[in-house]
Image (tube, helix red, strand yellow):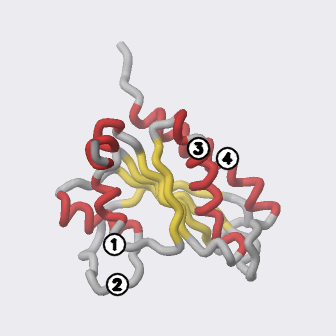
Amino acid sequence: MNDRIKITECGKSLVIGYGNPLRGDDGVGWHVAKMLQARQDDLEIEATACQQLVPELAERISRAKAVYFVDATSAGVQGEWRCQPIQSEGAPSALAHFATPSALLAMAQRLYGIVPKAYLFTICGASFEFSGELSAIVAAAVPSVVEAIENHATDHWRPTHA
């Protein structure tokens, strides 16, 4: 059985944690994705980590029930996180070396005719210096972000019972 059929049959949500894991809190998306990867056997979630969003992710996005992007931000209160729904916007550029979540959704729609519901989780970082470690305040936020994604993915796709 190929991966496409397997993932489609599983109907997994996709978590994409991105950022630079060598720039302190910029790597928080990686930490969230790795924590979810360690638990993926128990969940209907597939998680991946990457330094930047690339067009190749559009195909995986098209196979997902829902997509959760996780990234660091410098705007806000350090250690706090937000979740916001995102929409497919703009025309994707084949020449771009990076993409935005909304551009990847647009690419999935254009190439595969499918756009799953998508959400962006941002965690406000405290330090973006050269380091492979998260700041203490951001590291403390990671478990709550993981839990929120797990709960949302589970609640979002749980069948309703009469």
Q: Which quarter of the rendered picture does the N terminus lie within?
A: top left
C-alpha gap between disc 2 and disc 1: 8 Å
Residue farthest to the bottom? 95
C-alpha gap between disc 4 and disc 1: 29 Å
Q: Residues within 10 Å of mark 3 (few under 14, many from 20)?
A: some
**Is disc 1 placed on a helix, strand or loop?**
loop
Residue farthest to the front? 1
Q: Which quarter of the rendered picture does the C terminus lie within?
A: top left
C-alpha gap between disc 2 and disc 4: 33 Å
C-alpha gap between disc 2 and disc 3: 31 Å
**Chain-order first, disc 3 or disc 1:** 1
C-alpha gap between disc 3 and disc 1: 27 Å
69 horizontally vs 11: left or right: right
Q: Position of residue 29 (x, y in %)?
A: 59, 62
**Is disc 3 placed on a helix, strand or loop?**
helix
Image height of 140 relative to 71, above or below: above
Provide the residue designation for mark 4. 144
Provide the residue designation for mark 2. 96
Which amino acid type corresponds to the residue marked 4 in the rendered image?
Ser
**Is disc 2 placed on a helix, strand or loop?**
loop
Provide the residue designation for mark 1. 55
**Is disc 4 placed on a helix, strand or loop?**
helix
Which amino acid type corresponds to the residue marked 2 in the rendered image?
Ala
Q: Residue at x 39, y 76 (%)?
A: 99
Image marks 2 and 4: residues in contact by CB distance under 8 Å: no
Provide the residue designation for mark 3. 148
**Chain-order first, disc 4 or disc 1:** 1
Image height of 26 relative to 113, above or below: below
Q: Residue at x 35, y 37 (%)?
A: 10
